[in-house]
Structures are given as C-alpha cells and as structure tokens.
Amino acid sequence: MKRIKGTKLFVSAPAIYQPIESMVRLQKDDNTYLTAIEIPNSNFKEYKSQLTREAIESKGAKIDIDKPVKYNGYDAIYFLGPSKKAGETKIGLAFGDETFAMVIGGVCQTADKAAINELNEIIRTSYYDKSVEFNPLELINFTFDESITGFKYATTMGNVFFYTPNGKADLDKSNDVPSTFQLFTIELPSFSNAKEFLDYTISRYSNQGIQVSNVKKQDIIIDGNNAYEVIMDATDASDKKNILYHLMIHKGTKAVLFTGADGEQGKWLDKFKATAQSIKM
C-alpha cells in the first residue's frame, strides 16, 4: 500500500493508476480517477448531515445509493450516482469521527462497469491511519514570498492551501476572518485552458450567492510565464463586501491559481498582487 501524498490515506491500486500529486489524485486516464480530501476544521458527526439524499439532491445532484457503512472502524456513508457531466458516475465514501471528516471520491464513465468495480475495490481495501504525521505543505510545487502579507498557513483542503492573518489560530474563531488568500495547482495543457478555467470559476460565484461588479481582466507576464489577472468587487448573500484578486499563472501543463479576498476596503489588494506575482513555478 502507498500513501496518497497530502493525506493519511493508504491505497493499493493497479499500476496503471498514476499519482497526480498536484490534484491529490490517482488517475487511470482522463475519465477514471480517485481523489482524497480531508475536510478542514470539521468532524464527521457534523459533516454527514450534508450527505443525506435530501441534502445532496437539494444542490441539484442525483444519487442512486446513499447508505451508512463502517470503514476501518469509523462510521461512514457510501454514495454513488450520476455526475452533472453526462455519461459520468461519481462514487464516494465519507468517514470520520468527532475530530475529522474525510472523503474518498471516484469518477469514471457510467458505461465502464469494470472501472466502477475497480474504484469500489480500491476504496474498499484502502486504509486511513489517523496517527500518520506529514508536512501539510508537501504538495506545494511552487514558491512564493509569504513575508509580503505576513499571513500564515492555516489549513489545506485537498490541494488548496489557505492563508490567514494568524494562520491556524484563526480556525478557532467563531467570526469570519476578514481577509484571506488561497493557492492551488491544477493540470491544464495550455494558457487558454487556464484562462477558461478561471473564467468558469468566477462565473459560478452567482451560484454561491455572490454578486460581482467592476470586473477588470488582463494578461500579464510573471517570471517569464503567461498569467491572467482578474480583479473585482464582490458582495455575498450576507451583504459582506470584498475585493477579490485572482491570478492564474501557467507553465508547461500546470497552472497555479492565487485567490485573495480583501474584506478591509483594499487594505491588502496591493500586497495580494505582489504576493501572487512572487510565485515561481
């Protein structure tokens, strides 16, 4: 068994499944892969309420199987159903205890019954070792200057790294942290694909109750690499206002996306720009 980097999950998978570390994924091909994500600052007792058939279908998804099971001695929920992408099936296993919540997810073509069985077997024979310790930043394959904002690493969700003014200490606060930034890497074959990905991400803000205005876009060069910068004003459903700064940098077949949310009237915008533009891939 091998540990999926960025997690405490160990799996035994056919050799054809190759690690795509930047996406915390084991991938057979573009249509067939397994991901593992620990939900930050959460626990399974609370998280499982989001995995009922009613909760899943209320978000527009469909579910064929949703049942409680046991996994490595933990309470768990196994679910399977069609993806929003036509002809695709999603398989999931969520588990945990009062201290953590973890999700293993499989994706494949609905018509590929062998792949469904294969992914189910990988999930069934996997093992989660809660005692494992690892560097939470082991998946970062780029550098940037943290000193510009002084923000500290707070947590990770999959391959997304979150930074806040006080780091992990901010996770214990009941109030929202006013300003944050996050970074993650994604496999994208071209700069035009990277721009499309960022535009699509922004287009989905409205689904989260976020209204945007004053959108400014431009192509720039960062460290010799093509980059796409998008800045906008945003107001969420609770009327909280932010200036959102995005920078997608592309090199080879990879891209790094920096997203900063400045909830303090532009206090951090210039420092977010400088931080994002200090990224070296």
Image (spheres, rainbow, N blue to C red):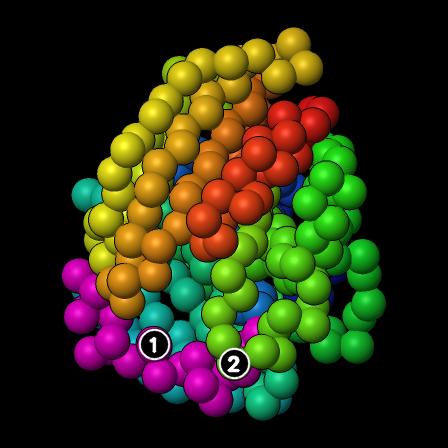
Helix, strand or loop: magenta stretch: helix
Q: Tell us which disc is closer to us: 2 or 1.
A: 2
Find numbered disc 1 in the image and state the secondary structure of the residue it sits on: helix
- Residue beneath the point at 41% across and 17% down: 218
Q: Is residue 95 left or right of residue 65?
A: right
Q: Looking at the image, is 50 positioned above or below residue 86?
A: below
Boundaries of the magenta span: 41-60
Q: Residues within 10 Å of mark 1 (few under 14, many from 20)?
A: some
- Residue beneath the point at 81% across and 61% down: 134
**What amino acid is found at the position of numbered circle 2 in the picture?**
Ser
Total numbered labels placed on residues in the image: 2
- Residue beneath the point at 46% across and 37% down: 245
Q: Looking at the image, is 61 positioned above or below residue 84?
A: below
Image location (x, y in percent) of residue 55: 25, 76
The foreground one among 11 and 236 is: 236
Q: Is residue 103 left or right of residue 86?
A: right
**What amino acid is found at the position of numbered circle 1 in the picture?**
Leu
Q: Is residue 49 magenta?
A: yes
Q: Is residue 129 left or right of residue 274?
A: right
Residue 228 visible in the snapshot: yes
Q: Which mark is residue 174?
A: 2
3D distance between C-alphas at marks 2 and 1:
24 Å
The image quadrant where one finds the C terminus is top right
In the picture of the structure, the residue carrying the numbered disc 1 is 51
Image location (x, y in percent) of residue 192: 39, 16
Q: Looking at the image, is 54 positioned above or below residue 233?
A: below
Image location (x, y in percent) of residue 109: 31, 44
The image quadrant where one finds the N terminus is bottom right
Find numbered disc 2 in the image and state the secondary structure of the residue it sits on: loop
Closer to the chain start, of discs 2 and 1, is 1
The foreground one among 87 and 281 is: 281
Q: Is residue 274 magenta?
A: no
